[in-house]
């Protein structure tokens, strides 16, 4: 067995005493700098391809604090909301469902979700794309459609969730229909004879219903990312989605949102590290308004998993990279992305920080 060969080398080089009464449990003594150390290796532990959950969630918040960081430019006008409105919108923590972000889906940064959710830029797909941007930077070559497909499906094989969420909206679909002179397009599964026509235009900004990817396309130069990478990734996504004979199609959840944006504020939702994250609807029909919601710490938990995945992919190319350093690079891009997307969607809106603890 391979580990016995390794142990033989260690015995000769380091002077290790090895006991192997249990073939799956190795007990050793090692002398380092004239000091003896005991060590135990459990070699029977199964190794899997599953993405690691890097930390365990240990608490569920019971308190909430709300702070207004910026007033809207239309402050004092009709339709403004204040701290009391935000507090009523969020409700009591005891009435809120909290989830472990390692195993939960992220919805898009959009105020048209009536069910409680976690939110980030571009949903699950946006978080994966952050890792893809850093991966391309590190390998130093422009990724091809086949390489992007391999990475996305490879991530789906290992991810903790059952599916990856992304969104579009009815306005984007209507724009596509007008460009190819079609009506009633089912964007989940369009007719085979019009799929190529849609693919040719699907990455145009106004054919994207997700506010984040639309901003990436419009301001790719500002963000110093390749617009072609954004466009190719979108086309690869839809090709996988439309391949209904593939198991990966079932793992892509595309939500078609309806009606126009009517968000009245931007919430930056934070919770203590290693705590569960709140599921909040971004739209409350009873109160008559909606919000942009961004789950700060929850998104960080997802990025740690994505960094680990892309670190393993880099190893296949003989590039050794620390997962924490890669995660830091992802975080830096996320900050830039959030600044640009936030400016595009919430420039004039009040900004609140929500702390669950």
Image: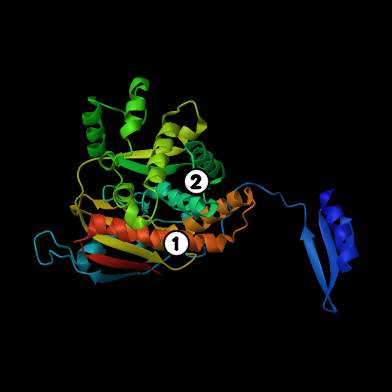
Q: Is residue 30 left or right of residue 195?
A: right
Q: Position of residue 303 (x, y in %)?
A: 48, 57
Mark 2: few/some/many CA within 10 Å (<14, 14-19, 20+): some
Q: How many marks?
A: 2
Label 2: which residue? Answer: 161
Q: Residue at x 20, y 63 (%)?
A: 85
Mark closest to the chain's N terminus, 1 or 2: 2
Q: In this orientation, does residue 68 appear?
A: yes
Rendered image quadrant of residue 276: bottom left
Badge 1 element? helix
Q: Is residue 76 left or right of residue 177?
A: left
Answer above or below: position of 24 versus 93.
above
Q: Is residue 58 left or right of residue 174?
A: right
- Cα gap from disc 1 to disc 2, whole angstroms: 21 Å
Rendered image quadrant of residue 92: bottom left
Q: Residue at x 42, y 48 (%)?
A: 124
Q: In this orientation, does residue 100 appear?
A: no
Label 1: which residue? Answer: 331
Answer above or below: position of 336 versus 136.
below
Q: Residue at x 34, y 49 (%)?
A: 108
Image quadrant where one finds the C terminus: bottom left
Q: Residue at x 13, y 66 (%)?
A: 75
């Amino acid at each position: 067995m391979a580990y016995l060969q390794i142990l033989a080398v260690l015995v000769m080089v380091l002077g290790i005493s090895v006991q192997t009464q249990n073939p799956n449990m190795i007990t050793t003594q090692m002398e380092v700098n004239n000091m003896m150390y005991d060590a135990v290796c459990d070699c029977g532990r199964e190794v899997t391809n599953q993405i690691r959950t890097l930390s365990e969630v240990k608490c569920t918040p019971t308190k909430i604090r709300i702070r207004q960081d910026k007033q809207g430019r239309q402050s004092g006008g009709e339709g403004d909301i204040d701290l009391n409105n935000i507090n009523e919108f969020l409700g009591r923590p005891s009435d809120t469902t909290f989830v472990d972000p390692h195993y939960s889906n992220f919805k898009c940064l959009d105020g048209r979700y009536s069910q409680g959710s976690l939110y980030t830029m571009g949903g699950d797909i946006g978080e994966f794309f952050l890792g893809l941007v850093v991966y391309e930077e590190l390998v130093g070559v422009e990724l091809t459609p086949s390489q992007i497909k391999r990475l996305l499906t490879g991530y789906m094989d290992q991810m903790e969730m059952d599916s990856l969420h992304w969104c579009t909206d009815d306005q984007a679909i209507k724009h596509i229909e007008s460009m190819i002179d079609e009506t009633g397009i089912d964007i989940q599964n369009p007719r085979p004879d019009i799929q190529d026509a849609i693919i040719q235009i699907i990455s145009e900004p106004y054919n994207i219903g997700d506010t984040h990817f639309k901003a990436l396309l419009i301001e790719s130069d500002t963000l110093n990312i390749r617009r072609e990478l954004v466009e190719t990734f979108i086309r690869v996504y839809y090709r996988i989605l439309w391949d209904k004979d593939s198991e990966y199609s079932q793992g892509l959840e595309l939500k078609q949102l309806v009606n126009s944006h009517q968000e009245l504020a931007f919430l930056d939702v934070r919770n203590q590290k290693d705590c569960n994250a709140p599921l909040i609807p971004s739209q409350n029909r009873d109160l008559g308004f909606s919000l942009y919601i961004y789950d700060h710490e929850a998104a960080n938990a997802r990025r740690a998993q994505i960094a680990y995945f892309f670190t393993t992919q880099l190893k296949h190319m003989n590039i050794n990279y620390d997962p924490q350093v890669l995660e830091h690079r992802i975080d830096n891009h996320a900050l830039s992305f959030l600044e640009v997307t936030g400016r595009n969607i919430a420039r004039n809106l009040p900004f609140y920080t929500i702390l669950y603890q």
